[in-house]
Image (spheres, helix red, strand yellow):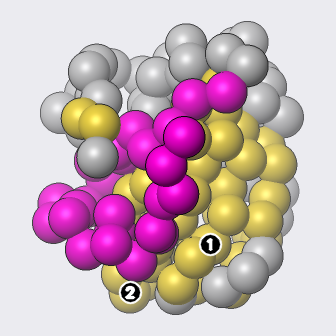
Amino acid sequence: MEKINLDDKLAQIHAHWQPHLVGELNGQHVKLAKLKGEFVWHHHEAEDELFLVVRGTLEMHFRDRTVELHAGEMLIVPRGVEHRPVAPEEVEIMLFEPASTLNTGNVRNERTVDHLKRL
């Protein structure tokens, strides 16, 4: 049982759209990532996702609307809902999601991360 300093862990992340594992609890992964630009449209058949903005602004695009999140705000995307994260400027986020969650959901491409690096 060690405390986790988010600033220290985020300072170790240098690539965008590459989530890193920082903890596990009850079958859930706690991940940190830096994002910049647009991600792919995707959904997760069996997993809900929680996005918590640590620093910056994240736009979560849905087919019918966009939700803007600022530092200290979070959003839960229910399973099956198509979404696309967009970060006009670099944003730092924390994710809580089941360990089975693939970052690109139902899409496999060059941004798919099959094996997470633990910080």
Please state if 56 lies on the left or on the right of 25 as rendered: left
Q: Residue at x 20, y 64 (%)?
A: 12
Relative to 70, is 11 above or below? above
Evaluate whether residue 110 shows in this view: yes
Label 2 Cα neighbours within 10 Å, binned few <14 / some 14-19 / many ≥20: few
Residue of label 2:
89
Write down the quadrant of residue 44 in the picture. top right
Asked whether disc 2 touches disc 1, contact meaning CB atoms under 8 Å apart, the reply is: no
Residue 101, located in which quarter of the rendered image?
Answer: top right
Which dot marks residue 53? 1
Question: Label 2 is placed on what type of residue?
Answer: Glu
For residue 80, which quarter of the picture? top right
Of residues 63 and 83, the one drawn nearer to the viewer in this rendering? 83
Is 62 on the left-hand or right-hand side of 107? Answer: right
> Where's residue 72, x and y in %?
73, 81
Where does the image place residue 99, in percent across and percent down from the top left?
56, 18
In the image, farthest residue toward the front: 1
Q: Position of residue 118 (x, y in %)?
A: 29, 37
Q: How many labels does the image show?
A: 2
For the point 68% across and 85% down, the residue is 70
Q: Nearer the viewer, mark 2 or mark 1?
A: 1
* Mark 2 secondary-structure assignment: strand
Q: Quadrant of the N terminus?
A: top right
The amino acid type, in three-letter code, at marker 1 is Val
Is 86 inside the magenta-drawn segment?
Answer: no
Q: Let me know if residue 24 is in the magenta part.
A: yes
Query: Which residues, given as a range, are shown in magenta?
Result: 1-25
Residue at the spot 45% in from the left edge and 33% down from the top edge: 103
Q: Is residue 112 above or below residue 55?
A: above
Q: Is residue 85 above or below residue 21?
A: below
Q: Which label was assigned to residue 44?
A: none
Query: Residue 74: image x %, image y %?
Result: 78, 65
